Image (cartoon, rainbow, N blue to C red):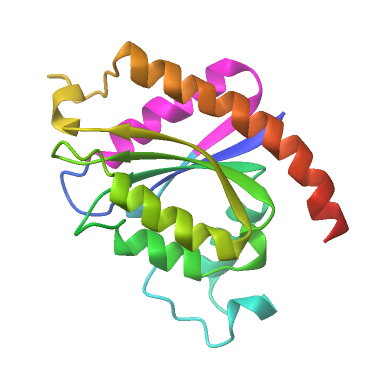
Amino acid sequence: MLKLKVISSTVRPGRKGPLIGRWVTDLANSQGNFEAELLDLGEIGLPLMNEPVHPAMQQYEHEHTKAWSAKIAEADAYIFVTAEYDYSYPAPLKNALEYLLHEWGYKPAGIISYSIGPFAGVRAAQNLKNDLLPLKVITVAEVPIPIVDSFINEEGAFVPTEQILANTTAIFGQLSRWAKGLKVIKEDA
Protein backbone atom coordinates (compact mmCIF):
# COMPACT_ATOMS: atom_id res chain seq x y z
CA MET A 1 0.00 0.00 0.00
CA LEU A 2 1.31 3.42 -0.96
CA LYS A 3 1.77 6.12 1.68
CA LEU A 4 0.06 9.36 0.72
CA LYS A 5 0.63 12.59 2.65
CA VAL A 6 -2.12 15.19 2.26
CA ILE A 7 -0.54 18.53 3.20
CA SER A 8 -2.83 21.40 4.19
CA SER A 9 -1.06 24.73 3.66
CA THR A 10 -2.91 27.30 5.76
CA VAL A 11 -2.38 28.16 9.42
CA ARG A 12 -4.67 31.11 10.19
CA PRO A 13 -7.84 30.82 12.31
CA GLY A 14 -10.94 30.07 10.24
CA ARG A 15 -8.97 28.34 7.49
CA LYS A 16 -10.72 25.98 5.07
CA GLY A 17 -7.72 23.84 4.09
CA PRO A 18 -8.09 21.26 6.88
CA LEU A 19 -11.75 20.68 5.92
CA ILE A 20 -10.74 19.89 2.35
CA GLY A 21 -7.69 17.98 3.57
CA ARG A 22 -9.77 15.70 5.81
CA TRP A 23 -12.18 15.02 2.95
CA VAL A 24 -9.28 14.15 0.61
CA THR A 25 -7.62 11.95 3.25
CA ASP A 26 -10.83 10.03 3.93
CA LEU A 27 -11.49 9.63 0.21
CA ALA A 28 -7.94 8.39 -0.42
CA ASN A 29 -8.16 5.87 2.42
CA SER A 30 -11.43 4.53 0.98
CA GLN A 31 -9.76 3.82 -2.40
CA GLY A 32 -7.76 0.85 -1.15
CA ASN A 33 -4.44 1.86 -2.80
CA PHE A 34 -3.32 4.35 -0.17
CA GLU A 35 -2.58 4.74 3.47
CA ALA A 36 -3.31 8.46 3.62
CA GLU A 37 -2.39 10.85 6.42
CA LEU A 38 -3.31 14.52 6.77
CA LEU A 39 -0.38 16.78 7.63
CA ASP A 40 -1.94 20.05 8.75
CA LEU A 41 0.73 22.76 8.84
CA GLY A 42 -1.45 24.70 11.27
CA GLU A 43 -1.17 21.85 13.78
CA ILE A 44 2.44 20.95 13.00
CA GLY A 45 3.54 24.53 13.64
CA LEU A 46 6.95 24.60 12.00
CA PRO A 47 8.78 27.80 12.98
CA LEU A 48 10.44 29.84 10.25
CA MET A 49 13.38 27.81 9.00
CA ASN A 50 15.82 27.69 11.90
CA GLU A 51 18.23 24.88 11.05
CA PRO A 52 21.86 26.02 11.10
CA VAL A 53 22.99 23.57 8.40
CA HIS A 54 21.64 23.58 4.84
CA PRO A 55 18.92 20.91 4.27
CA ALA A 56 21.07 19.23 1.59
CA MET A 57 23.28 17.89 4.38
CA GLN A 58 20.36 16.38 6.36
CA GLN A 59 22.11 17.26 9.64
CA TYR A 60 19.00 18.34 11.49
CA GLU A 61 19.40 19.84 14.94
CA HIS A 62 15.78 20.44 15.96
CA GLU A 63 13.21 17.79 16.84
CA HIS A 64 10.52 19.51 14.76
CA THR A 65 12.74 19.17 11.68
CA LYS A 66 13.55 15.53 12.40
CA ALA A 67 9.83 14.74 12.79
CA TRP A 68 8.96 16.64 9.58
CA SER A 69 11.76 14.88 7.71
CA ALA A 70 10.51 11.45 8.82
CA LYS A 71 6.92 12.21 7.72
CA ILE A 72 7.97 13.43 4.29
CA ALA A 73 10.60 10.71 3.75
CA GLU A 74 8.07 7.92 4.33
CA ALA A 75 5.68 9.30 1.69
CA ASP A 76 5.28 7.72 -1.73
CA ALA A 77 3.10 10.58 -2.98
CA TYR A 78 1.60 13.91 -1.91
CA ILE A 79 -1.52 15.94 -2.34
CA PHE A 80 -1.06 19.60 -1.53
CA VAL A 81 -4.24 21.39 -0.46
CA THR A 82 -3.52 25.05 -0.90
CA ALA A 83 -5.33 28.33 -0.65
CA GLU A 84 -4.38 31.26 -2.82
CA TYR A 85 -2.96 34.22 -0.91
CA ASP A 86 -1.78 37.26 -2.86
CA TYR A 87 -1.56 35.35 -6.17
CA SER A 88 0.50 32.51 -4.68
CA TYR A 89 0.39 29.76 -2.09
CA PRO A 90 0.73 30.48 1.65
CA ALA A 91 4.12 31.19 3.23
CA PRO A 92 3.85 28.31 5.76
CA LEU A 93 3.91 25.85 2.86
CA LYS A 94 6.94 27.53 1.29
CA ASN A 95 8.64 27.33 4.68
CA ALA A 96 7.72 23.64 5.06
CA LEU A 97 9.11 22.87 1.61
CA GLU A 98 12.39 24.66 2.33
CA TYR A 99 13.02 22.75 5.56
CA LEU A 100 13.92 19.66 3.54
CA LEU A 101 15.53 18.77 0.24
CA HIS A 102 16.20 15.09 -0.44
CA GLU A 103 13.09 13.77 1.34
CA TRP A 104 10.75 15.33 -1.26
CA GLY A 105 12.41 13.93 -4.34
CA TYR A 106 11.23 11.49 -6.99
CA LYS A 107 7.64 11.42 -5.81
CA PRO A 108 4.42 12.51 -7.52
CA ALA A 109 2.04 15.16 -6.27
CA GLY A 110 -1.46 16.36 -6.91
CA ILE A 111 -2.57 19.87 -6.08
CA ILE A 112 -6.02 20.86 -4.87
CA SER A 113 -6.19 24.64 -4.93
CA TYR A 114 -8.97 26.89 -3.78
CA SER A 115 -9.86 30.52 -3.27
CA ILE A 116 -12.67 32.60 -1.86
CA GLY A 117 -13.18 34.04 -5.35
CA PRO A 118 -13.72 32.62 -8.82
CA PHE A 119 -10.05 32.00 -9.70
CA ALA A 120 -9.94 28.71 -7.75
CA GLY A 121 -6.36 29.12 -6.59
CA VAL A 122 -4.90 28.45 -10.03
CA ARG A 123 -2.14 31.02 -9.51
CA ALA A 124 -1.22 29.36 -6.22
CA ALA A 125 -1.07 25.99 -7.96
CA GLN A 126 1.14 27.36 -10.73
CA ASN A 127 3.60 28.90 -8.27
CA LEU A 128 3.64 25.72 -6.20
CA LYS A 129 4.35 23.60 -9.28
CA ASN A 130 7.30 25.85 -10.11
CA ASP A 131 8.72 25.45 -6.60
CA LEU A 132 8.19 21.67 -6.50
CA LEU A 133 10.17 21.06 -9.66
CA PRO A 134 13.65 21.78 -8.18
CA LEU A 135 12.73 19.45 -5.30
CA LYS A 136 12.21 16.69 -7.90
CA VAL A 137 8.49 16.42 -7.17
CA ILE A 138 6.44 15.64 -10.27
CA THR A 139 3.02 17.31 -10.35
CA VAL A 140 0.60 14.98 -12.10
CA ALA A 141 -2.83 16.61 -11.70
CA GLU A 142 -4.68 19.59 -10.27
CA VAL A 143 -8.18 20.20 -8.98
CA PRO A 144 -9.19 23.89 -8.72
CA ILE A 145 -12.04 24.84 -6.38
CA PRO A 146 -13.59 28.31 -6.87
CA ILE A 147 -15.58 30.16 -4.20
CA VAL A 148 -14.66 27.60 -1.55
CA ASP A 149 -17.23 28.81 1.00
CA SER A 150 -20.01 27.56 -1.27
CA PHE A 151 -18.78 23.98 -0.63
CA ILE A 152 -18.81 24.20 3.18
CA ASN A 153 -22.08 23.05 4.73
CA GLU A 154 -23.71 24.24 7.97
CA GLU A 155 -21.91 21.54 9.96
CA GLY A 156 -18.55 22.83 8.71
CA ALA A 157 -17.81 19.93 6.36
CA PHE A 158 -16.53 20.15 2.81
CA VAL A 159 -19.16 18.91 0.33
CA PRO A 160 -17.78 18.62 -3.22
CA THR A 161 -19.62 18.63 -6.51
CA GLU A 162 -19.63 15.46 -8.60
CA GLN A 163 -16.99 17.05 -10.84
CA ILE A 164 -14.65 17.83 -7.92
CA LEU A 165 -15.15 14.28 -6.63
CA ALA A 166 -14.41 12.78 -10.06
CA ASN A 167 -11.34 14.98 -10.58
CA THR A 168 -9.96 14.16 -7.14
CA THR A 169 -10.56 10.45 -7.63
CA ALA A 170 -8.67 10.70 -10.93
CA ILE A 171 -5.69 12.15 -9.05
CA PHE A 172 -5.45 8.95 -7.01
CA GLY A 173 -5.07 6.84 -10.13
CA GLN A 174 -2.35 9.12 -11.47
CA LEU A 175 -0.51 9.22 -8.13
CA SER A 176 -0.57 5.45 -7.83
CA ARG A 177 0.80 4.93 -11.31
CA TRP A 178 3.52 7.58 -11.02
CA ALA A 179 4.54 6.54 -7.49
CA LYS A 180 5.25 3.00 -8.67
CA GLY A 181 7.35 4.23 -11.58
CA LEU A 182 9.22 6.86 -9.59
CA LYS A 183 10.23 4.30 -6.94
CA VAL A 184 12.46 2.71 -9.56
CA ILE A 185 13.97 6.07 -10.46
CA LYS A 186 14.49 6.97 -6.78
CA GLU A 187 16.36 3.70 -6.19
CA ASP A 188 18.78 4.60 -8.99
CA ALA A 189 19.34 8.17 -7.73
Which residue is found at the position 61% from the left and 33% from the top?
A: 175
Residue at far right of view: 188
Counting from the top left corner in percent of width and height, residue 13 is at 17, 50
Q: Quadrant of the C terminus?
A: bottom right
Vertical position of residue 7 compared to residue 94: above or below: above
**Residue 29 magenta-highlighted:** yes
Which residue is found at the position 38% from the left and 58% from the top?
A: 127
Vertical position of residue 79 compared to residue 31: above or below: below
Which residue is found at the position 52% from the left and 58% from the top?
A: 132
Counting from the top left corner in percent of width and height, residue 1 is at 72, 28
In terms of depth relative to the viewer, which is nearer, 11 or 88? 88
In terms of depth relative to the viewer, which is nearer, 156 or 169? 169
Highlighted range, magenta:
16-37
The quarter holding residue 188 reads bottom right
Counting from the top left corner in percent of width and height, residue 161 is at 29, 15
Residue at far bottom of view: 52
**Residue 32 magenta-highlighted:** yes
The quarter holding residue 121 reads top left
In terms of depth relative to the viewer, which is nearer, 85 or 72? 85
Which residue is found at the position 14% from the left and 30% from the top?
A: 149
Residue 154 shows in the view: yes
Examine the residues drawn in magenta and state their main secondary structure: helix
Residue 75 shown left or right of residue 89 in the figure: right
Vertical position of residue 183 compared to residue 23: above or below: below
Counting from the top left corner in percent of width and height, residue 110 is at 50, 39
Residue 126 shown left or right of residue 76 in the figure: left
Residue 119 shown left or right of residue 66 in the figure: left
Residue 60 shows in the view: no
